[in-house]
Image: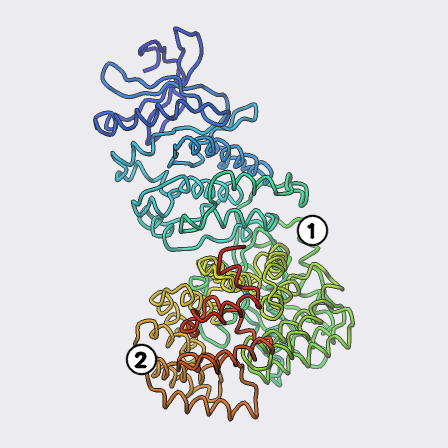
Amino acid sequence: MVGKIISHYKILEKIGGGGMGVVYKAEDIKLKRIVALKFLPHEFSDDVTAKKRFIQEAQSASSLDHPNICTIHEISETDEGQLFIAMACYEGETLKRKIEQYPPNIAEAITIAQDVAQGLAKAHSKGIVHRDIKPANIFLTNDGGVKILDFGLAKLAGTSCITKTESITGTVAYMSPEMVRADDVDHRTDIWSLGIVLYEMLTGQLPFKGDNWEATMFAISNTAPASVKQFRKDIPISLERIITKTLQKKSQHRYNDMQEVITQLQSIDLKAKNLLRVAPVKPSASIAVLPFIDMSPTKDQEYFCDGMAEELINSLTHIKDLRIVARTSAFSFKGKDVDVRDIGRTLNVDHVLEGSVRKSGDQLRITAQLVNVNDGYHLWSERYDRQADDVFTIQDEITLKIVDKLKVEIFGDEKISVQERHSSNINAYNAVLKARFFLQKFSKADLGKAIKYYQQAIDLDHNYALAYAAMSYCYCMYSNYYYLPSKDVLPKARIAAEKALEIDETLALAHSAIGYIHYLYDWDFDSARLSIEKALELEANCVSSRSALGGYFAAIGKTDRAIEEQKRALEIDPINFIQNVYLGLFYLWDRQPEAARQQLLKTREFSPEHPWALWLLATTYAHDYQYGKGIELLHQALNVAKDYPPVIAALGWFHAMSGDKKSARKILSNLKEKSKKSYIRPFLFAKIHAVLGENDIAFDWLEKAYQERDSSLSWLLNDESVDCVRDDPRFDELLKKIGLYKYKKGLS
């Protein structure tokens, strides 16, 4: 081809090529200028209908006059009938090549995305949709310009040979869900694809991947992408939020138009976090830290063993290029005889750290072994014989040795975070370890023990911010698990969290707790989001913060976003029972009973008889009018938790829904009797009376719930148990008092 003259173009050299054609540099003999000629594959030219449609599309695109759109000079064909495009020839490289060789830093990525969005906004204003935005179709000129290539080609491919694997492998990862379904597309499909490109620029990763193109298409339609902050902690939360919205599965949940995207990108403060400095680095290693084994003579150091492992997890979490499995999932193997290779496969990690503790008086022996799960060999092992008050030094040595052996680069500020101690008081530290041990059990009595030990730690060290934050979390759990009235415990939670932030304003757990309090007690949903996002900005892999964000979205009726955030929480902590249950709950509130059922059946693999899983699983059958099946599951739950009020109330609600009013009233009487001795949420009475058709009584209980700041009211927009009174004018009045009415009407 080189040296040939085609029409009035002399071919000079080949400069690129792919599934959509081959590109040559050529001289325009008539106008004495250098151009780029793109020759489309012969099969495209042979499809007469597709060829005509493409020419129409390309003619429309050629009319676009914008600095971010590649200029098209001519659409023509060779003597043999092969289509080609003559366009401006630029010096530079594609964004695809840049990402592969030296990815853009955050500021560059935002600038590139803005320029692409500007060009697309122009096209969309003319009714033209690109359909194939990807790094290979974005050209970066040597003088800093950004040009969008290949308008019109995606539609030609879609009508001709898109089913050819070699033609779609480079494109499928950027397809929107509506393209995967072969539905009609509009400008919002370009918004999705731009979100994919921005995600890839920032992380070096694609958000949706599979072993083949069918698996990738499935991921696009069904899975949530990992948070960009899982790969890069320096990404501002506002930028993460933009990407999340561009990648909403339903096109109506994305930005309305490209101008909105531009406005949001322009609002990011590029100087706030020194965004000009670092380009994305792919995580190079992954690890799970298992609970250490108690080898002490009296076997009374379980709390210390668990705490040792948890402290190592917390330290390693600060390392950007290391993926660390959260505590709950890693601890799910506690006491089980499981090969580390199987653990690695289950948790999707390459390495496992295991160890043991032998403590006798002030003498401490700690052993640690780092294992490669691919072959089961030890990469490193060490034994430490020290005094008990040397535990902090031992933790630092183990952490830094792991970093060294996994060849993870650690920067100065990360090293400071890794070695940071919230308290240097060994006795206060021991009290916190004991508190954590009881906190994980989540019973009412164990939460009380946890608070007692956190208070003990605070008494020993008045500036122990982490102890205050964790105590706040305990008080939140009292409310969350229906143990005590919100009005009695959440103000205490606020005091503890605010004290923690007074000591250390960078403590993510404290910001997260404040967020919980805002939407469970204050009903100040805007403030809740700000607090939770601040927590995630400080610690992107904090499971409780990610789940709190999901809860916030569920509260304001955006259940699709709640599901997305909860899936992200499970990427960090995949075997966390409670987090898996929350995902099932959010599916329920999104009115997806089958998805909820499958998710909750999965949770029973972790804890077959847990009352929460059985309670919510039963509720999925209410959506299918299978009340008998639901009642059967609730009786199973009550065999485990005989006096758990929400399960008892759910049974009363089911009987009322099935028409068995006598049984429902009997359960109401039972709950009222129990309320004389222990706390029962007013909302639990309200929902049964509502189904019985006793609206006046139901609203009396709802008013009592409002007066008590019953946190169940935070979920009124979604909770199916009060669907039967939604049309009552008093329901909207209640929503207005709580601050949820504006979300119902889409006013926020």
SS label for mark 1: helix
Instruction: Tell whether 347 sits left or right of 630.
Output: right
Q: Is residue 581 visible?
A: yes
**Residue 542 occupies quadrant:** bottom right
Is 570 situated above or below 476? above
SS label for mark 2: helix
Of 558 and 668, which appears nearest the observer?
668
Amino acid at circle 2: Lys
Q: Which mark is residue 413?
A: 1
Marks 1 and 2, how far apart at CA: 55 Å
Q: Is residue 325 visible?
A: no
Q: Are marks 1 and 2 in contact (CB under 8 Å)?
A: no
The spot of residue 548 in percent (x, y) is: 55, 64
Q: Which mark is residue 629?
A: 2
Of 654 and 345, which appears nearest the observer?
654
Comes first in the chain, label 1 or label 2? 1
Amino acid at circle 1: Asp
